[in-house]
C-alpha cells in the first residue's frame, strides 16, 4: 500500500480485496509515464478499469515484447 500512497498521495482510495491484495482508485492521466511506473511494479499490479487504460497497457507491453521477439 505504501507505494500507492507514495505515488498518488493520501487521497488514493485503498480497499481491501482479500487478505493479501487491495484495490486502489485514483484519478490519473493515462499516459506512457503511468504505464512505465506500473510496469516497474511487474506482476504485482493490474489495471482493472477503465478499459481504455487496460488496452493502452496491453498495447505498450505488446510493442515492447515485439522488440525483444525479433531476431537480429
Image: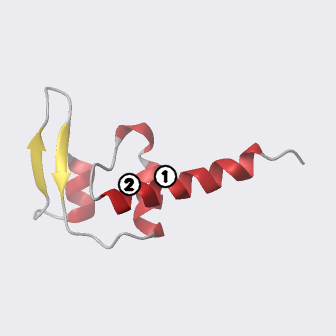
* Residue 41 horizontal/vertical position (percent): 41, 46
Q: Nearer the viewer, residue 37 or 57?
A: 57
* Label of residue 20 in the image: none
Q: Residue at x 17, y 64 (%)?
A: 9
Q: Seen from this angle, which residue lies furthest right?
A: 72
Specify whether 7 is left or right of 13.
Answer: right
Residue 41, placed above or below residue 51: above
Q: Residue at x 36, y 62 (%)?
A: 52
User: Which residue matches tag 1?
Assistant: 58
Residue 7, placed above or below residue 48: below
Specify few, some or many for label 2: CA neighbours under 10 Å numbering under 14, 14-19, or 20 or more: some
Specify whether 40 is left or right of 61.
Answer: left
Identify the image quadrant of the N terminus. top left
Specify few, some or many for label 1: CA neighbours under 10 Å numbering under 14, 14-19, or 20 or more: few
Q: Residue at x 63, y 53 (%)?
A: 64
Quadrant in which residue 56 is drawn: bottom left
- Give the Cα separation between the discs numbered 2 and 1: 6 Å
User: Which residue matches tag 2?
Assistant: 54
Q: Are marks 2 and 1 in contact (CB under 8 Å)?
A: yes
Q: How many marks?
A: 2
* Residue 34 horizontal/vertical position (percent): 40, 64
* Residue 12 horizontal/vertical position (percent): 14, 60
Quadrant in which residue 4 is drawn: bottom left
Residue 67, placed above or below residue 30: above
Amino acid at each position: 500500500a505504501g507505494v500507492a500512497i507514495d505515488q498518488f498521495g493520501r487521497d488514493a482510495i485503498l480497499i481491501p480485496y482479500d487478505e493479501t491484495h487491495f484495490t486502489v482508485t485514483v484519478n490519473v492521466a493515462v499516459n506512457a509515464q503511468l504505464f512505465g511506473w506500473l510496469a516497474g511494479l511487474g506482476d504485482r499490479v493490474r489495471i482493472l478499469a477503465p478499459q481504455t487504460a487496460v488496452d493502452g497497457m496491453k498495447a505498450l507491453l505488446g510493442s515492447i515484447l515485439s522488440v525483444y521477439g525479433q531476431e537480429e
